[in-house]
Amino acid sequence: MRGVWLMLVGLAICGLAMVLGFVAAPDAKGFEGDSYRIIFWHVPAAWTSFIAFGMLFVGSLAWFWKRSEWGWTLAGVAAELSLLFGLCVVTSGPIWATAEWGVPWDWTDTRLNTYGVLSALALFLVLSRRSQPDTPEFRDVFSGIGLFGFLLVPITYMATRWWQERHPCVTVGCEGGGGESGVDSVILQIWLLSFLGMLILLIGQTMVSWEVQKCEQRLAELQRRMD
Amino acid sequence: MSDVAYLAAAYAAMIGLIGWFTWQLLDRLKDVQARIEAVEGSLSNPTDSDE
């Protein structure tokens, strides 16, 4: 099964990036000790979650606009993947923050709070999809939340530039001296390698999750025929 | 707790989450495929359920 192979390849690349983060990446300016090395998974996981939220937006839009079964399946797959990568970010972030700041969360930081809301939204969507009957009304509510929740993605991404608070602005595109990227080139390369691994993992998980959703829909159809 | 311990805890949490999600995804696929086979089997042999 291609999806499973892609997941394994993605995980292997992520593992390689993690090891390179330990052995090849230099110390980062402005950070104490080794705890900053969490960024080699934390940041790519956040980028990957934004792609998953984008998939949720597209799927929700396709359901609302065209009443597309394809869109409904995509929204279900994307909600689960948004939750997975969102949880990776909101668990690793506070552990790093405890080491760096002495506290796991800063309630005054916009990026932390908007990302927390995004992850909570993904959790709500996954739980509601598993617990509620599959009716057109439920699909409309689900898709509405998926559509409007996506508004938080650009706000979260830009939060450290619009309101520089506690969360570090060490993302690609943040400018350091001389108008160049503020990120060391070795760190950037390992980051991008890790992001590639997570993208391949996301594609593999999407393929397997899609198959699961289609099988569940087929099973529901067969059970209706039996009744 | 030392720096490296926090780092190890954060990576362990993410590896655990990804591993758990992947495992339950494959488990769900296996389970739903087995249930489809069972239902299709009973639909193709209606006499079993009629008796």
Image (cartoon, rainbow, N blue to C red):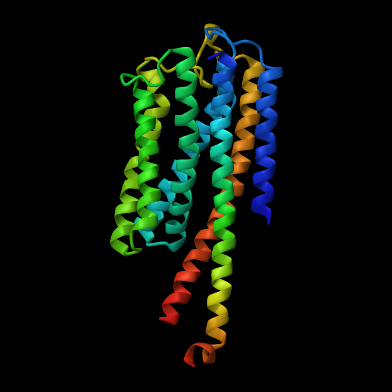
For image coordinates 44% across by 30% down, the residue present is A90
Which image quarter is the N terminus of chain A in? bottom right
Camera-side residue: A175 or B32? B32
Q: Residue at x 63, y 35 (%)?
A: A196
Could you tell whether B40 is left or right of A23 in the image?
A: left
Residue A174 image position (x, y, % from top left): 49, 17
Residue in front for this viewpoint, B27 or B51? B51
**Rendered view: A227 above or below A114:** below
Using residue A103 as the reference point, say whether residue B21 is left or right of it. Answer: right
Residue at coordinates 45% horizontally, 70% vertically from top-left? Answer: A220
Tell how many labels.
0
Quick check: A224 left or right of A29?
left
The spot of residue A115 in percent (x, y) is 39, 31
* Image quarter (top left, top right, bottom left or bottom right) of the C terminus of chain A: bottom left
Q: Is residue A168 visible?
A: no
Looking at the picture, how far across and down is residue A160, in whole percent? 40, 19
Q: Where, by quadrant of the figure, is residue A182 drawn?
A: top right
Q: In terms of image quadrants, where is residue A94?
A: top left
Q: Is A162 on the left or on the right of B30, as rendered?
A: left
Q: In the figure, A100 relative to A215: above or below? A: above
Q: As displayed, is residue A47 above or below residue A134?
A: above
